[in-house]
Structures are given as C-alpha cells and as structure tokens.
Amino acid sequence: MATTPEDDTDRRASAGAAARTPPGTDHGEGYWRFVTWIDDGGATVGLTVHVARYGVEDADGRPTHAHAATWHVRDRGTGHRADASWTDTGFLDLARAAAENDPFLDRSVRAAMLDLLKPGDGLYPDRELPGPVVAGGGGLDLDYGGVVRLRADGDRLLLDLRGDEGSWRLRLTPAAPASPHTAVDGLPSARPSRVVPRVVVEGTRTDADGERPVHGTGWYERVLPDAPRDAAGPVPDSEPVWTRAVARLDDGWTVTATRRGRVDALTGRTRTEPVEVLLHSPEGGCTTVRASVTDAATWTSLASLRVHVTEWLIEAHGGLRLWVRAWSPSQESRALLHGTGTLVAHADVEGVRGGVPVRGRGHLESRPAGRITRFEPHMRGIEAVVREELRSVYPDRPDRDALTALAGLEERPGVLDASTADDLHAALVRPLRHTTDGAGKGMRTYLWLQIVDLYGGDPQRLRPMLAVIEALQTGNLMIDDIQDRSPMRRGRPAAHTVFGDALTINAGTHAYFLVDQVLPPLVRGDDRLLLAVYRIVMGIMRAGHAGQALDITGHAAAMDEAVRTGEAGPLLSRIRTAHLLKTALPIRSLAEIAALLSGASEEQLRGVRVYGEKVGLAFQIGDDMLDLRGVTVRDPSGALTSTKLRAEDLREGKVTMPLAHAVALLPPDRVRVIWERVRTGVADEAEAAEIADELIACGAVRACEDECRALVDEGWGRLRGDLPRNWSALGLHALGTWAVHRNAEC
C-alpha cells in the first residue's frame, strides 16, 4: 500500500543500495530476479525467485544491510500455487520509515502500517527470516537464514530454497551471454541491470512425494546496486509502475519487453516511457528495439484492488507479434518486497516472428500504482467489480434469463414473454440501476472483501455476494429517499423523482431478496450456513427498519427537552440508538456474513461483530459531521460531483449529532435561537451555512470526532487479539481510521 524498498531509493524504504563492485568480488548487493520453467516428472512448473540485499545506514550512520526474498511456484496443469516471502528486521524498518516519511501517503494507511509493521510481527505472506543473513567473504555467497541460499560456482549460480511445501536445490548455467538492460525496480532514475536470457536449470525438488530430479530453462536479471543514499532525503512525488514480459520461444529466441512509467502522487496521471524490447538470438546476439504493446486483458485483484495486465500483445518491427497470456489471473504477490500487490505470473506465448508461427513459455510481471494518497478513492476501486456483478443480475437491457431469475421463476423458464420482460426490466431493474450507477463510497463492499480475505475465504468465489451487499444498501436508500423526500442521491436525482414513489418502493423492497437468488449456489450442501446467513439478513432488515422508524419520527421532541433543560445526554443516547439500528448493526451483520462464509472461528466472529458495529457507528456519526460541509466525490470521468448538499439535514429540520453536542457547548440562549431556526427547516442556504459554521467552531464536530475515535479504538482493540496477520488486516485498520478522519479530508 505504501511505497516499499523495491520502489524508490530516494525513500527511506530503499535508503540506498550498496556501491557497485566488480563481478565476482561483490556480496550479492542489489536485486536478483530468476524466472524458470521446470519439467517436474512431466508436469510444467513455473518458479520465480526474487532476492534483495540493500545497503543502508543504521540509526548511527553505520553501513549495514536490509534483506528480503520471495519465491512463487505455479503448476501449469493443476493450477496449484505456493508462495513464500521472507524479510529481516532491517527490511521491516525500511517499510516503516517509508510510511512514516512519505508526505503523500494517506494518513489512515500510514497509521495502519506503523501499527502493524513491527519487527517480529509482519504481515503474511511476509515472515521474519528464521536466522541471520550470512554473506560469505570469497565472492557471492548469501545465506538468508537457511531458507534461501544464493552462491556462485564459477560461471554458474547455485540456488537453494527451503519452505513449508518442500525444498529446491538448483544449478543455473548460463547458455547465452549477459546483456545490459535497464531495471524495473522503481527508481527515480533507472538503474542498470544485466540480463542472462537463457539458462539451463538442473537440480532436485523435495516435497511430500520425496526427492526427485528436475530440469528446465530459465532467465535471470541482476539489478546492480547503487551508492548509499541519505535515508532522510526528499520523497519523490511520483511512483514507479511497470509491466514486463519474458518470452522463451521454441525457435531459440528470447524476447524481454518492458513498459515503464511513473504515476504523479497529486494528479494520479501516469507518464509512460516508450516500450523497450530486448531480442536475444539463439547464437547469443542481442538487439534492442522499440515496440508497441496492448493490454489485451486485465484482472482486478479483490484483495489489493489493483488492476493487473494478464494478457499482453507485443508488436515490433521485423514481423514480431506475440501474445503473452498468464496461466491464470490470480498470481498476485502481496509480499512487502513487491509493494503488496504485484502480478508475478507464468504464462503461455504464441504468435509470429518473421512471418513464422512461434510458441513458447513466458512470464508476466505487472506492477500497477499502489501508493494510496487518499483512502476513499482507493476504497472505491472496487466499484467497477461491484457494477459488473450487479449487471449480471440487473442487466443493462432486458435479458429473459436474468429477469426470470430475478422474478423467482427458475423452475418456469418460459413464463416471461418479450413484452413482459421489457416491463419487468423497466420496473425492477432500471430504478435500482439508476441509483447504483451513481457515485458511492464502496465502504460496505470494501469492508466485506477485507474480512473475506483476512479469514482465508476466496474473494473470487464469493464475488457474486458483492451484488447482494450493494442491492441491500441501495434498496434501503431508495425507500429512505422517499420517506425523507430527498431530491438527490449519489450525485443524481433520487430514484423516486425519476420513476415515481410506487415503482421505487417496489424495486427497492425487491432488492432485499436478491440474497435468496445469489447465496444458495455459493453454499450448496451446507444448509446450516445458508440458514445462518438468512437469519443475519433478516436481522439487518429488522434493525434497519427500526432505525428508519426512529429517523422518520425524528428527534424534535428530545431536542426540545434538551434545549429546555440544557442536558444533552438523553438526546445523544437517542440519536446513537437510531444510528446503531439504521447503520451500525447492518454493517456489523455484513461483516459477520463475510467472516462466516470464510470459516472464521467463533472467537474471531465476536471480534468481527464488535469491530463492524463500532466502525458502522463511527461512519454514521461521520455522515452527520459531513452534512455541515457537504460531500463531493469524483465520478468515473474524474469530475467532482455533489452527493450531499451543505447543511442538507439542518435545512430539513433534522437533529444530528453535532447539533445535539452543541447543546452543552453553546450558551443556552444561542442554542435556543439555532433550534428555533432549524426546527422548521432553514430555507435560506446562507443562513444554514452560517449555522453549520457555528456548530463547527463551537467544538461540536470535535466532540463527534473524539467519539468516533473512541469507538474505533475499542473495536480495533477487540478485533486485534485474534487477528490473522495479513495485508487485509491493514485494510481494516485503515478503514477504521478513515471513518474517524474523513470529515477533515473532505
């Protein structure tokens, strides 16, 4: 999420690599990438290894090193994958320093990283090396605590790996000379590297089936070290991104294509450099050419929300046209070394070279932008996936199969004729899609996915539930807008102003039952789990409608009493109860569903419930605070859209948390005057803005923020005790911090 040691040596995250030394006399400083395609008893296995050794300075300015290593095993036939990632204390220190000193990093993400990234307490898949790193004195010989060993043996390299699923002992013999290249390692000015395009791989693999010989081919890159840099130096205002493809063709040629760019931290714009392609002939010759590339397919990781290239078309002069297709899209590495979201994917290659069809083996490494400068836009990264799931059940145009399912007619597929399907689409689909297609926050779906990933669920398999979550919330909002006579929702006219009350009520109510269409196939055969989720959904409905009942009734009488007595306690308690029912308990329930479907233990479920409730309550109090400022978000085109007018609740005569807190913060006479103006609605926008400013100035918003902070701290303290140590824990932590501070960031 933050920039990490691979990203930028101008940052403390890579506080400078060691000075360059002659080949054969160095100690492995820099960065090594190994890509291999291995024949393991007839099975095609891809193995990618990254080894990093950075020269840094300790707190006293003395030279030392930071280390990290990862490896990734992919089975072409079965789809099985195994990943291992190791870091030492120095590497974790660099990551913490990167978060602490990056002024562009979102404050919520920074707080989460500083809380969770601690020596001996990293986030999975990263584990602390089980022993010290030992560098031999006679040349390249690095031993990473017994789990990775890289050493030179003449012109060959010996690579040993030991992990939970077994071990590898490999000998890599160059079959072609090294060529100079430019590294994809995220530096502000690219570092030189040397690429060995063809390697013969021999050795053994040991796992549950025993030890056996393996052989194959490979490619590797040595990124040369840079001079040590000042750890407190300036932080670049742009982030490196890249995509690289390696293609080992059956005709003996090797193609290495690289696209680099940098993303501006303030504007989000990407500046892309021309694509560079290295062509290595079977005879050992090397040519560098410019080429064009096309992102033929992409995949959104539901864990990191990054969009990765999974299929690349490379075209260059001389008749080169190659398709590089990942074996499967879900080959993302979330290791700290990879910036917590890099696709490290083995691939198939086919195409044409010089007019002749070619095939081969390939590798894709895709590193999109990962620096989170503002948490809310990052959270909304799930929006495209949610809309895709919604379109599958609420299609853009009348689709008889989809509408048959929506109507519960699966056992009578021929009932809907074309005319009936058209009417059903207009009456059920269009009102809901009108609302869901507006600019939302994505908080509930983000929370849901983080919990699924946190407790070992499969976000891809459970992805259809995103439509259920969005439909539940949207149906509630559609009906809420009718009851409140709200003219706007998510930056567009509220559904009832477009489709009328009757259709909007019916479509909104129907959305509550989408769970009955989507969930059963996901839990087929587990009736107890199905019933448990149904009961939770029913609880959402009961609590939400009770909260809406209090919202419709309003808090005017309680405010009258508070103004008369000067005692705000009963009023605040009433508002908290309404917020609990309308928002906090439904969010708690969604979090519980995510944990249940992911196999969380009962103790973990208790923590999830508490955290979901506290964050939900803080979120709703935050909405009350945001009313005093108004809310704008960026729509998909990037344009600012108003989703909530300033002081909208005050203008409608509603009693909110800041107004209730003001009872104890303003002089009684002034509270009485404000309430007299608000009670019947404030028609004048300027006057409403003045009242909002006064509520902010008197400390009412600060009191709300303090309450939100206490709620989230309590929830996080309860959750953390049984928290699995992975990167989704960081996402949940950041979400809670955002719920506290989002008022100040608007």
Image: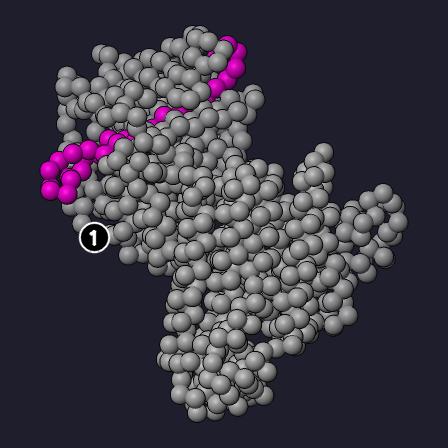
Residue at x-position 55% and y-position 85%: 560
Image position of 161 (left or right of 514): left
Depth order, front residue of 326/429: 429
Q: Tell me, what colour scheme is on the image? A: one colour
SS for callout 1: loop
Image position of 336 (left or right of 515): left
In percent of width and height, residue 481 lies at 65, 71
Image position of 457 (left or right of 172): right
Q: Does 460 sit above or below residue 704?
A: above
In percent of width and height, residue 531 lies at 71, 44
**Residue 209 in view of the camera:** yes
Residue at x-position 51% and y-position 31%: 326
Q: Main secondary structure of the magenta part?
A: strand
Residue at x-position 38% and y-position 47%: 1
Residue at x-position 58% and y-position 88%: 680
Disc count in the image? 1
Image position of 493 (left or right of 148): right
In percent of width and height, residue 307 lies at 48, 44
**Quadrant, the C terminus:** bottom left
* Magenta part of the chain: 40-68
Tell me the kind of residue under disc 1.
Pro
